[in-house]
Every structure is written in structure tokens, then in C-alpha cells.
Amino acid sequence: MNSNSIKRIRIILGLFCVCAFVIVCKLYIVQIVQGKEYALKADKQYERNAVSTFDRGSVFFTSKNTIKVAAATVKEGYTLSLDPRLIKDPSNVYEALSQYVKLDKDSFIEKASKGDDPYEEIEKRLDREVGQSIASLKIPGVSVQKENWRVYPGDSLASHTLGLLGRDDTDKLAGRYGLERFYESTLYRPNASGAKNFFAELFSGIKGTLEGQGKEGDILTSIEPTTQSSLEKILLETQKKWQSDAIGGIIMDPKTGAIYSLALRPTFNPNDLKDVKDASVFSNALVENSYEMGSIIKPLAMAAGIDSGAITAQSTYKDEGTLMLSGRKISNYDGKARGVIPMQEILSQSLNTGVAYISLKMGKESFAKYFFDFGLGEKTGIDQPNEQKGLVKNLETGRDVEIATASYGQGIAMTPVQTIRALATLANGGKLITPHLVTGIEYADGTTEIPEAFGQSQEVLKKETTDDVTRMLVKVVDTALKKGEAKMEHYSIAAKTGTAQIADPRNGGYYDDRYLHSFFGYFPAYDPKFIVFLYHVYPKGAEYASETLTDPFMELARFLINYYEIPPDR
């Protein structure tokens, strides 16, 4: 055999190896990466009348044992339809089908009797078993077509976090709220009918086949389903008891920003929207609505004063009960003077004049800078759509009275997620973190990505400062909150309540009888695993948050300590 023949054989063998490699790679892609897509194609071939080949990435909760729990997924089933032209006895057909599907007899008979009508849709979203059972009857004129649709196994559980689907401006089914909208580009799947023919693209190259695959994935969240359910239950009970207009809560890891639970009432069931009267219920008020939070902001003012050196935790001041600033009077909730008292009493007795004193002693510019450093007036970066920045222009006026009122949470407005983020700096040693819901994205190619931004933080307070404020807040719970009745013997809890008048948008100023109640706390206080924020709007029958939110907070604290088996810290 001459050298030319040997070269030709080598070239042929080389080409054969390349082709074999390409085919093996292609088979991997088809069977592993794109298996679901081609299964849908096969369904289309064999079920020519398929109603829908809808597909979409899944969203998962994560249990405390790191087990994935389906939160939003695609369900396969069938649509039941009739060809009335082929139905001889509508009553007999009704009797046969009613064994499997609950049908209105009069409506069914009417549709089945339209002798010149080729198609009447009877029922959508039948379970697979039901659809297959009906198909096995082989009744002339009765057919089932495969259908896929979005389903939320927990019904209303975490509905504001998850969001829902709706038609966009191009009539495409897309995420309209919550994670469904925020991660639309990741969850969206192009319609199976738009895919290329397998054999036509077999030799077109691996690179072309993989284009666009990297963006398609499933979403893993930090929402813990049992924790979420417990928060929702407590919010429901609290709203019923106090008849508040709206109520919400967040449970978060103060060190990482991972959110275990986020809940609101009123709520909705994305599987069944027939009872929804107002589309505003779909919006996530925890990131979209701003409120004047009141006294839960006082610990931030205390921290700013200590961190700046204007005061220490052991400082004292003379409380006069009122202050006159820029022609306006600022007073404590009861208008009474306390005389010379330590800083601790500012938090224990929730004294407006006390934090006003701190803010003015710091100086307006220094105080405002700390509050901006806490992230007030900016978006937190949480992975929810339509996040708002809040309203903090009073920090920029340079007037003493606006700085003083801001120190006790009046005249500035924040979203609940902004609020818990700022307060988490007290729990985590002074770091400003990013609240987030997604902990990972599992892509179709088998890789997993953890969003980098969610692990970043910046220092805004010294650790020594947060230690001081934490000790003060623990004393608030142990001695002042419900006169010490809320204290847990074996667990240190740092917490503070807030009561703020609600602004009157029609007449200006504030309502005399409408309040926003808020409560935050973290525990175990010196190495916290959780920070909890609760609020409700215009509760009836009680003026102060300590009356309406202490018990719900403590119930949540006991649940979390027991459920996560947190060891005692004292």
C-alpha cells in the first residue's frame, strides 16, 4: 500500500471520528439538555389537536433540610372537547363522562346537540388520569387533547413572592408580578413549534445548537414553606383580631439577606383568580409601598449617634418632654418630661425628644449621611419587580425640625424591605446586605449559578456600635416590652416597636385616629439567625404597636426557635 493510500485512509478515519464525535455530542444535547423540548415535539406529532405545548421553567422553595419543594411548575393534562356532528345520543354521552368530570347537564346537552358544529370545548385542565380514562372510552365525537399549564402547588402560599402569568403587549404568556416577572428571561421557554427540525440541524454545528440555552433555567429560592405557612397563618389571625386594612411581614437571615418568608394580606390564589376584584392585590406592598415607620427607626438614630462619637451608650441627657424647632413643637408620646436620664431610657420609653437630641448633637449633615448609608432613599436590589426608593427628602432640607422628626421615623417613608435591610445592620455587626429570594439558578445545561450581588455587603457601622445597641434592645425586651412579660428566659431577643400616625392625603397633615404599627426583632440577639419585621395599617381598637404586634412576634420567635432547633444562648 503506497503512502497516498495511507493518507486517504487516515483522512477518512479522521472524518469518521469527527462525525462520530458530533453525533455523540448531538445525542447528549437531545437526550439530556433538550429532552423535554423534543418530548413536546413528539407529543405534537402524535396528538395533532394538542391545545397547548406551553412550557416554562420551575420555581422551587427550599425546606430547612435543603430539599427542593415545587412552588411553580408546569402540569400536564387534557382538554375535553366534542364534535357534536358525531354524537348520536347526548344523554348517554353525558352519563358516561359524568363518571369522571363534574358537568352541568343542561349546558352539556345543549353543546352536544349542535349537529352542525364541529367543535365544542367542554372542560379544560383535566388531570392526566382523568383524560386518559375518558380517551379509553372511545366514544365517537368525544376527544381529549393534551394541554400544559402553569400551576402553583401551594395555592396562595407566597403568592406575592411568586407572582403569576398573564398576556403581555404581544399576547405572549409572560410573568406579570413577583419572581415570574423578575426572572422572565430565565423562566421563559420558546414555543416548541418554533424549534428547528432535528435532522436539519444535526450537522449545522454544536455551537449553533447551544445558542440561547444558557439563559433558560429553574429558580431556587430561600423561601422555607413551613416558615412561610406559619407567618401567613399568624398574619391572618392578627388581621382578623385587629381588623387592619393591610398587614405584612418578612423573616430574613440578617447576615446574608436570604429571605425565609415574605407575606402580605390581602392575598390571592394564582391558580384561581375568579374572586379577585381589584388588581392591586397582585402588587407586592413590601417592596412597592412606602410608609412612615415611626419608632422602630429610633435604634438606627441611636446607632448613628454612638458610631459618630456624639454620644456613648452610657451618656445622659435632660429630657424636657418637648422641643421647639423651626417654629414647631416636638414632644414625647405623652408630652411628659423625664429629667436627666441615660440613653437606655430613650429606647425603653421610646422618647421622641431623646433621639431628636441625638440627631442635633451629631449635626444635620452627619446624621443624614448615616441614614443614607443605611440605604434609605435607594433600592435594596431585592429580586422583585417595581421596587420603590422611598421618600427621604426631609433629610436634605437642612432644617433642624426635619432631621429631628426623621430620627423617630416621621416625615420620611420607607418600604418594608428597605426598613428590614437597614435594621439588619444592627443584627449583623454593621453590614448593609442585599435582601434576596433566589439562591441559585439551575440552567438547562446542568450548571448552577448563584447571583453574585446577593453575597456582597458594605460596612456602615462599627461592630462595637452594634454590640452596644443590641444590648440596649435586649434590655427593652427584658424590662420594658409589656413590662417585661415578653422576656424569654433562655433566649436573648433584641426588639423595638413602632407607632406612626398615617398621613392624610386629602386634607394634609396626619389622621388623629389612624396609625401604622410596626415591630422588628432579631434573635438570638448576639448571634442572630433571624430578623423579623411585621407591620399593619390602621388596626382598630388599639393605639400602640406593643398592644397589637408583640404577641404575634413572640409567637413567630417561639416557632422559629423550635422549628430550627436553635440552642439557648443564656
Image: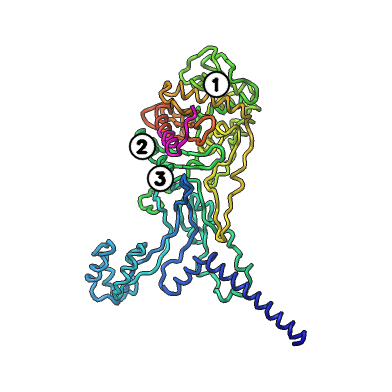
* SS class, disc 1: strand
- Residue 561 covered by magenta stretch: yes
Q: Residue at x 52, y 53 (%)?
A: 219
* SS class, disc 3: loop
Residue extending farthest to the bottom is 1
- Asked if residue 329 can be seen in this view, the reply is no
Q: Which x, y percent locates residue 530? A: 50, 36
Pick the residue in front: 79 or 516: 79
Q: Which mark is residue 328?
A: 1
* Three-letter residue code for mark 1: Arg
* Three-letter residue code for mark 3: Thr
Which residue position is annotated with label 3? 267
Question: Are discs 3 and 2 less than 8 Å apart at CB?
Answer: no
Label 1 crowd bin: few (<14), some (14–19), many (20+), radius 10 Å? few
Q: Residue at x 45, y 51 (%)?
A: 69
Q: Which x, y percent locates residue 564? A: 45, 39
Residue extending farthest to the front is 1
Q: In this view, does 101 lie above or below 276?
A: below
Which label's residue is closer to the chain start, 3 or 1? 3
